[in-house]
Amino acid sequence: MKLSTRERLEELRSQLSSVQNLNKNKTAGDMKFYIFDYDPKEEMRVREVTQKAIKSNPEIIYFDLYEMMLEIIKENGYFDTIKQMEKDYDKSLLLQEVFQPMLALEQTGNEILNRFSSRVHDDGTHIILIAGVGKSYPVIRSHTILNNLQSIFKRNPVVMMYPGTFSARKGHLKLFNRLDDDNYYRAFPIIDRGEE
């Protein structure tokens, strides 16, 4: 039976109420990486439930990819320059020549990944909750973040809020239900949508 958005959000809130709830989920010995996919039209509702979960559970460590990206750009002194460049240059050129080199997740010592590892110890007592996937696209890609976090979080469960669809069987991510966002095979749906 297909679950309504309300039912899925209620179950999400329950799952996020403690690390133990997420550790009960069967992942066949694989890492505890989960994706909560949702209709992008429900973004505000999802944010509201997410914020309530964060306030009620101190085990949750929240990361907004878009806010992290902006912090890094500002800390490196490029914010005003990039704002001006956005007016004068093609977005694909900016992505290739400015954002990707500055935020390259493949580099050792990457600032985004350092923020994850420095903010929370991987001791199995925290829930890593990631949002801002849609806001940070295409600069930060969800599958790239998840792939790179595998080396950082082996004990803490990771939950990514994903505005789009995730097919666990195919490992396929479709951002905003329209854009192919590559594949990620090691995550599980935190709340199954039910039969489609």
Image (cartoon, rainbow, N blue to C red):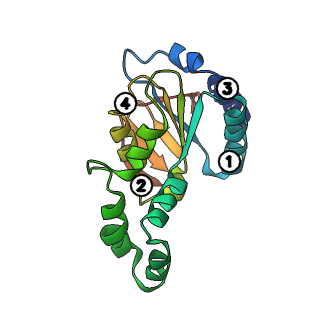
User: Looking at the image, is mark 1 or mark 2 nearer the viewer?
Assistant: 2
Q: Quadrant of residue 117?
A: top left
Q: Few, some or many C-alpha atoms within 10 Å of disc 2 (few <14, some 14-19, many ≥20)?
A: many
* Viewer-nearest of discs 4 and 2: 2
Q: Residue flagged by tag 2: what amino acid is it?
A: Ile
* Extreme residue toward the bottom, this view: 88
Residue 134 in the figure: left or right of residue 50 = left
Q: Are marks 4 and 3 in contact (CB under 8 Å)?
A: no
**Helix, strand or loop at disc 1?**
helix
- Residue found at x 67% / y 35%: 54
Mark 1 or mark 2: name the one nearer the start of the chain: 1
Residue at 62% over, 24% down: 15
Residue labelled with disc 2: 140
Residue identifier under label 4: 186
- On the image, numbered disc 3 is attached to which residue? 11
Instruction: Tell me where residue 93 appears, x and y as whole percent.
Output: 34, 75
Under circle 2, the secondary element is loop
| Tag 3: amino acid | Glu
Tell me the number on the disc at residue 42. 1
First-in-chain label (2 vs 3): 3
| Cα distance in 3D space between marks 1 and 2 | 21 Å
